Image: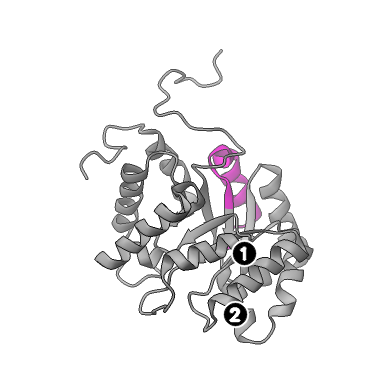
Amino acid sequence: MSEHFFAGLDGLPRGGKPRTCGLTMVIDWGLGSHAQEDLLAVGADYCDLAKVAVGVSRLLDASALAAKIAQYRSRGVEPFPGGQYLEYAEVHGLCERYLPAVAAAGYQWVEVSDNLAPVGLDWKREIIGCAVREHGLEVLGEVGQKEGLESGVPMVEDAQACLEAGARIVLLEAAELVSGDASTAREVEEVIAAVGVERVMFELPGPWIEGVALHDVHRLRRELLRRYGSEVNIGNVDPGELIITETLRRGLGANAGGEEL
């Protein structure tokens, strides 16, 4: 019997894991072990990275966090702590403790962001370089600002600096993608032209951004797939939206490809 009852009705082709493009990153707000197991049972083949959001890593005791990390990695998913936790450490003068703790916990990836903390590009370069050279970590360097904040550094300069410092992937902050600002849209395209769409991961927005509703998330996801193709990198996917995101990537539905946009 075929591995799939619907073999032959496959939709658009997709590369298998480990992928270098078409990456999907889910956001884990503290999933319990059973919820995480369920997510991976149905979706491990379609998930590449998992952001353990904000300071969730601190709220889990050592055994629970180690088990969470190991469970993801056993299914080919790389977990990493959310960048706002690093920013918290920097603001409170505790940054020297952060990267050693990330490595000791068993993480092999880390996010470096500066979208809330009052730090500069030199700080970001230093942290990325330290993560790579001293701790052997893979880095996702986030570019862009939360709503209501401004940066004096052009996004393209920020993105290039992250990659030159050793980051593997550039994350585009979700708030930038839903701003509706024409100059911001041009900056996003400049980043893609400079570093290549395969090095960029677009973060989906969520209710933590003022005015964002679920239909805004769906609209942006479909627009990203329409504009950049099925192998675009998409981040901040809600665990409950992982499977539907994969169906949209493959065009498995009358409107799945977003033709109406």
Residue 143 image point, x, y percent: 47, 66
Which residue is identified by label 2?
88
Task: Name the one closer to the observer, 66 or 51.
Answer: 51
Q: Secondary structure at mark 1?
A: helix
Task: Name the one closer to the observer, 153 or 33.
Answer: 153
**Quarter of the rendering occupied by the N terminus:** top right
| Position of 194 relative to 94 (above/below) | above
Q: Is residue 206 visible?
A: no
The residue depicted at 47 percent of the width and 46 percent of the height is 242
**What's the magenta region?**
29-49
The residue depicted at 39 percent of the width and 27 percent of the height is 11
Residue 235 image point, x, y percent: 48, 54
Between disc 2 and disc 1, the foreground one is 1
Residue 252 image point, x, y percent: 36, 31
Give whichever of discs 2 and 1 has the lower sequence position.
2
**Quarter of the rendering occupied by the C terminus:** top left
Q: Around disc 2, counting alpha carbons within 10 Å, would you say few (fewer than 14), some (14 to 19), or many (20 or more)?
A: some
Task: Please tell me whether residue 256 belongs to the stretch shown in magenta.
Answer: no
Amino acid identity at mark 1: Ala
The residue depicted at 49 percent of the width and 60 percent of the height is 171
* Location of residue 20 by image quarter: top right
Residue at the farthest top position: 1
Which residue is identified by label 1?
165
Amino acid identity at mark 2: Tyr
